[in-house]
Amino acid sequence: MTSIALGFITLLGAAGAGQWLLTENTRRSPTAWAHAIGAGILSWGLLGLPIGLLGLLTPTTCAAVLTISLLGLLGRRLSLPIGVAGGLMLATVALAPGILDVMGPIIGADERYLHVGLPLQMLMENGLVGGVLHPNGSRPLTLQLAYTFVLSSGVEGAAAGLHWALSVATLAFVVQLGRAHFDSTHVGLLAAAVLVTSMTFFTSIGQAASDIPAALAVLLAMDAARRGDIRPGAIAGALALSIKYTAAAPLLGILLCAAGGWPTRLKVSCLALAAVAPWWLRNIMEGHHALFPFMGWPDPQVTFQYLAKYGAGRTTMDFLWLPWRMIFEAETDSYRFLGRIHPYTLMLLGLAPLAWRSQRYRPWLLACALGLCGWASGPHWLRYLIPTLPLLALTGAALAAPVASTRLRKLALWAGLALGTGVGSEGVITHLQQAHNGRKLAGQSAIDFCNQSLPSDARIAMLFAWSSADIDRAQLLGSVEDHVPTRHFLLANTGRELDALRETGATHVLVRHVTFLPSSYFFLDRSTFSSEFIDPIDNLNHALLMGADLLFRTPTHRVYRIGAPQ
Amino acid sequence: MVTGERETLNEPHTWPRAQAVSIPARAGTGSASTPAGLAWVADGPGDDADLWWRPDDTGLPRPLDVGPGDQHHPVSSGDWLAWVSSGQIKLWNTTSGEQQVIDASTGFNATPSLYGALVCWETRGTKDIDIACSDGAEVTRPGHQTHPQRWRDTLIFRENGRVFSVLTSAKQ
């Protein structure tokens, strides 16, 4: 429970720091508490950037930032309406099963290599990491720096605890927005229920991740846009973009219908982009593309994501069938959407044509439409839809509210929700059981070997391996998407793999046995598949046999010593 | 036969015995046993591996081969024990005390094979991995030949995911 307590304390700290960035007007609004949290997290990112660049990212600095942020609560008083307190309590109860995940081991791939793994590496290096050897560190690290601050406490589940607390805040904010923008608590409650009964949302809450925080930022942007409030709108936009670039799609919809006309929209856009720009400047100054690692890999070119791998096809017919398939044909354990969402997420939006003319609904519908289109244009995994998911749920619930005007219709609406839970919540029980039982990690014995038998100053090249968070030694490379960092490094150094690794300072190599199946890359011709996926592995195995010492081997992992540069 | 006076000990008591010295085995490594005792690999300084030995007669672990570099890959056959020790393969008859040393740069991948006092090991060629044996037998051909196993004049090894067997007595 220490993780949960730390998560809530950190949220308070964020609110304490963030409220000083809000205008008096915003601080008196009923949604000020959420805007303060968002502003606090953004400010930590912008503060953490120079701290990290100066090599001062130590537990002491992190503790100082959190303490000063908490002291920020003393100077001014944020308004927290009673309804919000009730919403927070309700959300805490609804999301309580996620605490099992928080208290369990770190098992999510993303938290292992990115949301926990990267902060732990930064704490080990006392600064930011980035570039082709640490491509995950070249993203905007707003959220990861917040995780770094809380992980500096030494509590393993602290980042997951913060994420869980953010999820509670998000759900409470959804309930509040229902009342604030549609004059109905029922709208907010229905939207929150749709989210909780969507497996993709629910199973994410107890792991350190970025999707739900991005969703909170998108909701903050929508709230500010509807109020015509420039500063919190810009802060929320910058927060969303610096957490997850894919939030750009719903943000564009929000911007296009923001109150205040084009001068206001332009001003908000410029301010938001200016707050993300330091991360782009950092990449440019380090000789990379501003949007690295998503774009601008140096030669040899590698495709960051093969979109055809995800979902259920990308032909015109596939896109026409997409709304049906993403609900009813999604699978929780495969590339076919990897998750489940409640049918209401899209079904209730069927009323959209009737509401398009309404000034009240149109901005929400536009944001939903662009959010959905943005998701459809990217990889078809349902968790990538999470930044738009609360918007979809709220808009759908708001559209259904006038229809469910009588008690009987309202009852039918909630009965439909219960009925759809079987579809939306598939896989939740399995996930919670795994969290409760503590799923055994593949390669745990190799991880134990690295932690027990390698010298404390070892520097491990993680090849095709996700397990960054589990190893308490300095690391480089690691994985993301199709193991792009490892594959790019091997392709760029064909024939001199080990020498190149030694030149980076690596002393050891952890290799995960990986098998790329041709059937998963059916869209690639045989020679491309071979040169991009098979040859690098063969070359690496040859180089390791010829020049490295095998220290540890299991069927899934191997650990080698590669020694100093020769 | 035990002789002498019998003395009654006060209750409760424990039988006097030497404190067991625990030298944990390095994760992922194998041990080798002969009728005289057990050899195993332990963590040394840095990422070095050291070899330890526990003779059956005393049961007290003692270092068998430690120092800079790796002393590892113990393997046994009958009374013979062999292991890789920094550029050498060392053989020790744990009953007679006879010792042999073979210069061999191996131990980078798989454990050598021991059949009696006959040892086979992986060796790095200029282009790939080959196999050599202490009786002069060797397998050198394109591709990596690894994981030797010797039984009489039969040498079994892996190559490109397949298992091969050759008779060392046959002319290659």
Image (cartoon, helix red, strand yellow):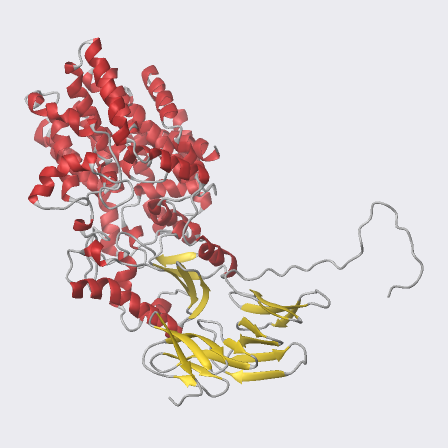
For this view, does A100 lie left or right of residue A261?
A: right
Residue A361 x, y percent position in the rendering? 12, 22
Outermost residue toward the bottom in this view: B171
The answer to whether residue A59 is above or below residue A539 is above
Which is more toward the observer, A492 or A76? A492
For this view, does B124 lie left or right of residue A521?
A: right
Quarter-wise, where is residue A437 in the image? top left
Q: Looking at the rendering, in which quadrant would you find the C terminus of chain A? A: bottom left
The answer to whether residue A496 is above or below residue A312 is below
For this view, does A565 lie left or right of residue B60?
A: left
The answer to whether residue A367 is above or below residue A541 is above
For this view, does A193 lie left or right of residue B45?
A: left
Residue A57 visible in the current orientation: yes
The answer to whether residue A102 is above or below residue B24 is above
The residue shown at (30%, 37%) is A42
Residue A269 visible in the current orientation: no
Residue B126 x, y percent position in the rendering? 35, 82
Which is more toward the observer, A489 or A564? A489
Residue A277 x, y percent position in the rendering? 22, 45
Residue A78 x, y percent position in the rendering? 34, 22
Which is more toward the observer, A66 or B29? B29
Outermost residue toward the left in this view: A357
The residue shown at (12%, 27%) is A365
Outermost residue toward the right in this view: B5
Total numbered labels: 0
